[in-house]
Amino acid sequence: MKTIFNILAICFLTITSLNAQEKVDLFGISFIHNPGVGLMDPANENLESIDLKVTELDAFIKYPIKLGNDKTVLVNALKWHFVKAPFDDLPNERSFEANLHSIQYDFMIMHRLSQKWQLLASLRPTLASNFKDGISSDDFFFQGMLGFKYIRNEYMNYGGGVSYTNGFGEPNLVPVLLFNYQTEKIKTEVKAPISLIFTYSANKAIYGFQAKLDGGQYHLASQEGDGTIIINNETVKFSRYNLGPTLGWKINDSSRFEVSAGISLKRTLKVIDIDGLESDYDLKNGLFFKTSFIFGK
């Protein structure tokens, strides 16, 4: 764990040494609770009566830099996602602990190619593991995106591209459609099929709706001090779509508090052992509850 904290410290110092040129969300932290539900397709009768709950934490810190030519913006972000997976609630012969962490550094370039066209490119090196025994090359995953936007006017732009993402629980190359519309009170951001965010601001209140894909592929390492493997699992794949309304409150011009709830769909949860054998723990659709604090906008 000491290595993880060193990496976080270096990235934090790098990012906070930058000066933000525009108002954006600079910091945020969220807590997500998924109440217990049963398995979608239990492998045997011992698994039919169990309910599994998932708890998650999200945090990010982000700073943009606008270059001197006013055509290019660099965005640096550090993101951490924690999943308290429910495997310790399984029957004894299947039970094991899996506290899953994802640490992602996101470097994005937004470059104005002309008056109407903008290039988007991002690189997202990611460490995803339970980090039981430090960091290894198996914990590393590379993600990224390349796209173009057409700037229709000061309120609207749209475009498309491709994203290489772990969001579906394993690396996938996914075509994406981009759409943004923003006025003083209305904000719409679409990155289909990954996310859709709509908000309406009325004084201090914020009303909205979100649909978002989240997930990842995590390497598992669990060893005793002498190096003996004590669990026979190598990878966990987790993903789901969360859909529901959002209610926010502006604390001041720089910060806000948000709560949301809704339904969590297509909950994929799989374990792959060191021999490549897959165990399916996909969860039934169920509720989710999320609280967030966001600073910077």
Image (tube, rainbow, N blue to C red):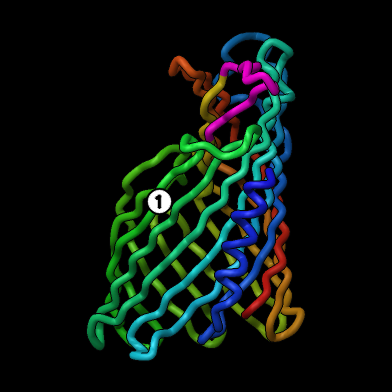
Q: Verify whether residue 24 appears in magenta.
A: no
In this rendering, the answer to whether 175 lies above or below 146 is above
For the point 67% across and 44% down, the residue is 287
The residue sitting at the front extreme is: 226
| Left or right of 283 in this view: 140 | left
Residue that appears at 51% across and 38% down: 139
Residue 238's place in the image compared with 214, above or below, is above
Viewer-closest of 254 and 68: 68
Task: Classify residue 251 by image quadrant.
Answer: bottom right
- What is the magenta range? 219-232
Q: How many labels were placed on the picture? A: 1
Q: Which residue is mark 1?
A: 143
Q: Residue at x 43, y 77 (%)?
A: 181
Residue 227 lies in the magenta-colored region: yes
Q: Main secondary structure of the magenta part?
A: loop
Find residue 178 and report its horizontal and vertical position in percent.
35, 66
**Residue 268: percent from left, percent from top:** 52, 33
The C terminus: image quadrant = bottom right
- x, y percentage for residue 169? 47, 38
Picture quadrant where residue 69 is located: bottom left
Q: Nearer the viewer, residue 18 or 171?
A: 18
**Residue 224 screen position, x and y as percent:** 69, 21
Q: Which residue lies at the image location 65% right of the left edge and 23% below the top edge?
A: 223
Considering every residue shown, the one lying at the far left of the view is 114
Three-letter residue code for mark 1: Gln
**Helix, strand or loop at mark 1:** strand
Quadrant of the drawing holding the N terminus: top right
104 versus 69 height, above or below: above
Taking the image as shown, residue 88 lies to the left or right of residue 232, namely right
Question: How packed is label 1: few (under 14 Cα within 10 Å), some, or many (20 or more)?
Answer: many
Occupied quadrant, residue 26: bottom right
